[in-house]
Image: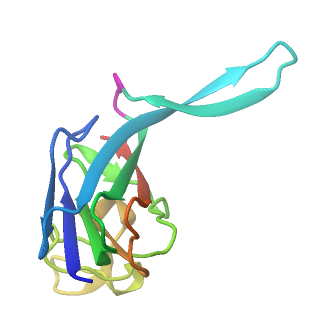
Amino acid sequence: MKRMKIFAAGMVLAFAATTAMAQQKDCILLKTVAEIEKVDTNDRGEKTTRLVPAEKIVPGDEVVYTVSATNICDEAADNVVIDNPVPEHMKFVANSAVGPGTEVSYSIDSGFHYDKPAALKVSNPDGSQRAARADEYTNIRWVMRNPLKPGSVAFARFRAKLE
């Protein structure tokens, strides 16, 4: 099994292109979907929430980004890492990054360094430091704990608000 690193590049509403980098042949197929929550009310007044494609958003709207990673090769992909920037003009929503079977970390310097939220520090003008806020995160990283078996799909998801 080989080590793989995947980069998902993004735009505000949808990811036009994703780039997969791996030490082995291109075994991970990435797909990213941008959606918004829509609340429907039935005749009895019961509300249900569903995700629909984010075709048009306005400042303040929250977008749900879902990245799927499919292993299209005949062998398991070990140490799969998905790096994803927070799209331009969007602010990451605190505690929204999830990925079953993954370790999630964040960057505040465009993906040069990643760490857990408690370890991310921002320098103040006076030289002191403070904890980084979630809306200052520039990138999210999901590291899969287990190999991705042939034909299997893994998901990573986060939310961001349009400035």
Q: Is residue 123 visible?
A: no
Give the quarter of the figure containing the N terminus: bottom left
Give the answer, above or below, for where 28 lies relative to 81.
above
In the image, 17 versus 124, the foreground residue is 17
User: Whole-percent x and y of residue 4?
Assistant: 21, 75
Residue at image point 35% right, 40% down: 33
- Most extreme residue toward the front is 74
In the rendered structure, does residue 56 fall within the stretch colored magenta? yes
Among the 4 quarters of the image, the one containing residue 162: top left
Task: Please give the name of the residue rendered at 43% of the width and 55% of the height, measured from the top-left corner.
Answer: 157
Q: Quadrant of residue 109?
A: bottom left
Left/right of residue 55 with respect to residue 19 in the rendered view: right
Image coords of residue 112 (percent x, y): 13, 76
Give the total number of marks visible in the rendering.
Answer: 0
- Which residue is outermost to the top? 43
Which residue: 23% across, 41% down?
Answer: 15
- Judging depth in this view, the residue of 74 and 30 nearest the camera is 74
**Which residue is at a point 42% across and 55% down the rendered structure image?**
158
Q: Is residue 52 above or below residue 62?
A: above
What sort of colour scheme is used for the picture? rainbow
Q: Residue 30 at x, y = what percent?
A: 27, 52
Q: Nearer the viewer, residue 56 or 19?
A: 19
Q: Which residues are magenta?
A: 55-59
**Relative to residue 76, is residue 99 depicted above or below?**
above
Would residue 83 be counted in the magenta stretch?
no
Q: Residue furthest right?
A: 44
Q: Camera-side residue: 70 or 95? A: 70
Residue 65 is situated, as x and y percent measured from the top left of the image, at 38, 46
Q: Is residue 159 visible?
A: yes
Q: Which quadrant holds the C terminus? A: top left
